[in-house]
Image (tube, rainbow, N blue to C red):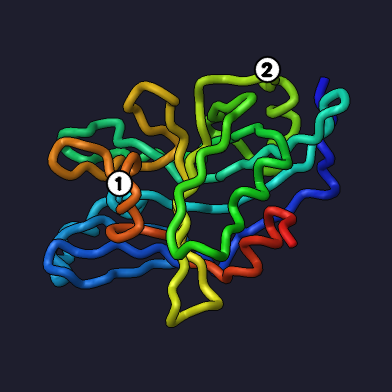
Amino acid sequence: MPEILEDEVNVIEEDIVGWSISLDGQWLSEDMIIPLRGVSENEQVHEGEENTLGLDNISELLLYPTMFGKDTLYILVKLSKSGYYEYAATEQRWTSTQVAYYYVFDAIEAKRLRNDDVSANTVKIKLRDYGSIEGIKRKRLVRHLKERLVIKPKTEQLLVVHIKFDAENKDKIYFQLSSQHNVFTEVDGITKDLVLNGKSLYRSPTLLNYIHYEYDKEAFFDFFNLD
């Protein structure tokens, strides 16, 4: 059984700003949420409970150091708001819930996230386990992880981290996370896919030109225990 070092968890629970560029070229922002894309002055695109989830949202990011035999692993957990209408056609009876997306990988892989020599980078980290847990409460997260984890030498799933730096705003980092298969085209771990010309932008290096999260650069690297 893996030993999850719960007392050593790193947490980000505030100060993330989500951005998306509207269809008329205006950048829109919201705390912890990447806004839906539409015409910037069209408020209808944000109406309804489902639309408040945005293209993606983060309640918390957690990173658990974990020991598995002689291996030092990280378990990255993204807590995200989700929900559904019981009567979708009439948008009635909204039920909200929380989903935990979790990704298990060798801790040394996190060092690949820091590369100050490039302004934009897409890092693909091989996962040793991954999944999601619906309707979970934060205080029971570790217990549920212990029940579900099946750590393997490797899987065909990747944690894909898009990263971008701004030369004019050196203290900030722009990023987005998703889970992708090494071969197939499905994208997981997000609220809604972003498709352009029939293809997911999550599989393109230009993703952050359309949507991204903004956060303090050094705090981001501290979260992943990077010097």
**Count of all numbered marks drawn on residues in the image:** 2
Screen quadrant of the C terminus? bottom right
**Which residue appears at 70% of the width and 62% of the height?**
222
Tell me which corner region of the image, top left, top right, bottom left or bottom right, holds residue 40: bottom left
Q: Position of residue 58 (x, y in %)?
A: 49, 52
- For the residue labelled by badge 2, is the local secondary structure a helix, a strand or a loop? loop
**Which residue appears at 61% of the width and 48% of the height?**
112
- For the residue labelled by badge 1, is the local secondary structure a helix, a strand or a loop? helix
**Which residue appears at 57% of the width and 59% of the height?**
115
Left or right: where 179 falls relative to 28? right
Mark 2: which amino acid? Lys
What mark, if any, has residue 26 been given in the picture? none
Q: Position of residue 103 (x, y in %)?
A: 60, 34
Q: Position of residue 92 (x, y in %)?
A: 25, 40
Tell me which corner region of the image, top left, top right, bottom left or bottom right, holds residue 148: top right
- Residue farthest along the bottom direction in this orientation: 168
The answer to whether residue 119 is above or below residue 3 is: below
Q: CA distance from mark 2 to mark 1?
A: 36 Å
| Residue in the foreground of this view, choosing between 101 and 180 | 180
Residue with the mark numbered 1: 50
Residue with the mark numbered 2: 152
Mark 1: which amino acid? Glu
